[in-house]
Amino acid sequence: MLDDRDIQKLSDVFVTKAEHKELKDTTVRIAEMVTKHDIQLDRLEKKVENIETATKAILTAVDKISKSVDDLRHEYIAIKLQLDRHEKWIKEIAEKTGVALSPA
């Protein structure tokens, strides 16, 4: 049979109704906080996704602009070379025909 000491030992091991209710309430609060944090995490993940999409679009646009600038630079170099060649020809023609060119 159980005596008072055995019952006391069992009381020390098992939780009381009040302790059980307190643990249950704490567990519910923790579950609510976890749910709230999950929702916030989902929102953050969506924002990060949007930022990644925007970043990719910006990088694509910058690449296109960079290519256009590079193409224009090559075109400018070609035009500059052609202009230098034309100026040289004009000077040669002026010298051969005896026409004096005014300085620019």
Image (tube, rainbow, N blue to C red):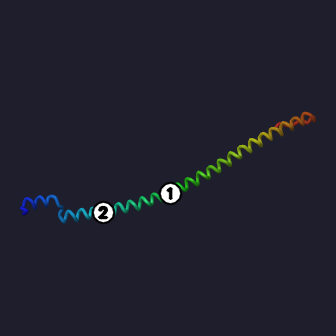
Local crowd size for mark 2, using a 10 Å CA cut-off: few (<14), some (14–19), many (≥20): few
Task: Identify the secondary structure beneath mark 2.
Answer: helix
Determine the residue positioned at 46% across, 57% down.
45
Q: In which quarter of the image is the C terminus?
A: top right
13 or 82, nearer to the observer: 13
Task: Identify the secondary structure beneath mark 1.
Answer: helix
Q: Which quadrant of the view contains residue 36?
A: bottom left
Label 1 close to label 2 by CB (< 8 Å): no
Q: Position of residue 61 (x, y in %)?
A: 62, 52
Query: Hey, which residue is sitting farthest front in the picture?
Result: 1
* Residue kind at label 2, given as amino acid type: Arg
Q: Position of residue 6 (x, y in %)?
A: 9, 59
Query: Hey, which residue is sitting farthest right in the picture?
Result: 97
Residue 90 lies left or right of residue 3; in this view the side is right
The residue carrying mark 1 is: 49
Determine the residue positioned at 52% across, 55% down.
51
62 or 11, nearer to the observer: 11
* Residue kind at label 1, given as amino acid type: Glu
As drawn, 52 above or below 29: above
Local crowd size for mark 1, using a 10 Å CA cut-off: few (<14), some (14–19), many (≥20): few
Residue 26 lies left or right of residue 56; in this view the side is left
The residue carrying mark 2 is: 29
Determine the residue positioned at 41% across, 62% down.
39
Determine the residue positioned at 80% across, 41% down.
82
